[in-house]
Image (cartoon, rainbow, N blue to C red):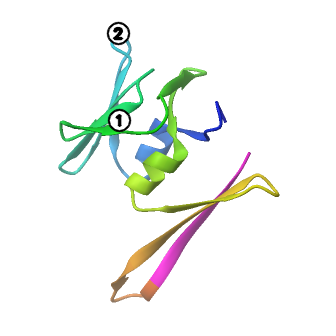
Amino acid sequence: MWEGNTYVPLRFLAEGIGANVTWDQASQTAWVKAGTVTLTFWVGKNVMEINGKQKEIGAPVILKDGRTQVPLRFITELLGWDVKWNEADGSIALTKSMEKNKRNGYGYSHASIRR
């Protein structure tokens, strides 16, 4: 949590969905490549690029403990997840509806994060 925003390590999230991450220390730039999509993030900026098109992310990308951290809400919503904040217990629930498939019909993925 930083300045009212919850952050998640970019590499952890990206590699968790099978994307490749490249980091350039000199420019403090991270690239995430997933299929034909390339995401570019710069430490200290509140914008990023998706295949060369700039997008506001609502809060700056930060470097904490040697890890590039991105705002959780922005990156999860970009990836199609719904974010719900539970102020009472400080938890965050992430849900994503899944496309109908032959093996299990309709379904939902769910993840929870506690601060």
Disc 2 crowd, CA 10 A, few/some/many (<14, 14-19, 20+): few
What's the magenta region? Answer: 107-115
Give x and y (percent) for residue 72: 53, 45
The residue at the point 34 percent across, 85 percent down is: 101
Disc 1 is placed on an element classified as strand
Count the marks: how many? 2
The dominant secondary structure in magenta is strand
- Label whose residue precedes the other's in the sequence (2 or 1): 1
Give x and y (percent) for residue 33: 27, 42
The residue at the point 67 percent across, 36 percent down is: 1
Disc 2 is placed on an element classified as loop
Residue 41 in the magenta stretch? The answer is no
Name the residue that disc number 1 marks.
21
* Rendered-image quadrant of the C terminus: top right
Separation of residues labelled 2 and 1 (CA atoms): 16 Å
Give x and y (percent) for residue 46: 42, 30
In the displayed structure, does residue 102 sit left or right of residue 113?
Answer: left
Q: Amino acid at mark 1?
A: Val
Residue 26's label in the rendered image is 2
Q: Nearer the viewer, residue 89 or 111?
A: 89
